[in-house]
């Protein structure tokens, strides 16, 4: 399983905005910082805005800012806004999605993995990332 560029860029942009939250709105070029295409980032920031994670300010001093305090925004919020929900298998939670639904020996394992990945992603906030909190505990 690999996180797509969409999720990585969105998380990176949100970490940057959280780290600059006291500095006011940030321009698209500042957020992109030569590490991601500005047009692609603009699309991602639009998705994050529609999901209530980013606000926009128009005008000469305008730009993008996080919509809530960094301790209230989790990795799950960001990735779900840009990637959709974590789903380990197509049959997980959907009875008719697979002909082996109900008798599949791997369904419980996928459900367990999905629950724990989601729990972990919901426990890590932007504040944790900025503070460089160790995640191995």
Image: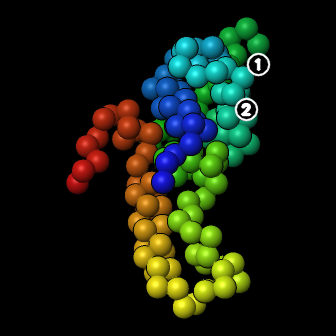
Q: Which residue is mark 1?
A: 58
Q: Pick whichever of labels 2 and 1 is earlier in the sequence.
A: 2
For numbered disc 2, what is the local secondary structure? helix
Identity of the residue drawn at 29% across and 40% down: 133
Q: Position of residue 35 (x, y in %)?
A: 53, 19
Q: Nearer the viewer, mark 2 or mark 1?
A: 2
Q: Position of residue 93 (x, y in %)?
A: 61, 78
For numbered disc 1, what is the local secondary structure? loop
Q: Compared to 95, does 84 lie above or below?
A: above
Q: Compared to 16, does 46 lie above or below?
A: below
Mark drawn on residue 43: 2
74 and 57: which one is in front? 74
Q: CA distance from mark 2 to mark 1?
A: 17 Å
Q: Is 110 positioned to the left or the right of 94 in the image?
A: left
Identity of the residue drawn at 32% across and 34% down: 131
Instruction: Name the image quarter holding residue 46.
Output: top right
Q: Quadrant of the C terminus?
A: bottom left
Q: Position of residue 69 (x, y in %)?
A: 51, 38
């Amino acid at each position: 399983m690999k996180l797509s560029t969409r999720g990585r860029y969105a998380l990176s942009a949100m970490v940057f905005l959280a780290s600059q939250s006291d500095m006011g709105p940030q321009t698209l070029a500042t957020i992109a910082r030569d590490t991601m295409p500005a047009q692609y980032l603009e699309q991602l920031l639009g998705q994050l805005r529609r999901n209530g994670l980013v606000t926009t300010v128009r005008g000469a001093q305008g730009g993008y800012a996080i919509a809530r305090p960094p301790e209230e925004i989790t990795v799950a919020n960001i990735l779900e806004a840009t990637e959709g929900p974590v789903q380990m298998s197509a049959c997980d939670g959907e009875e008719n999605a697979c002909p082996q639904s109900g008798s599949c020996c791997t369904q419980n394992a996928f459900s367990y993995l999905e629950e724990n990945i989601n729990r972990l992603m919901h426990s890590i906030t932007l504040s944790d990332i900025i503070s460089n909190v160790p995640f191995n505990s």
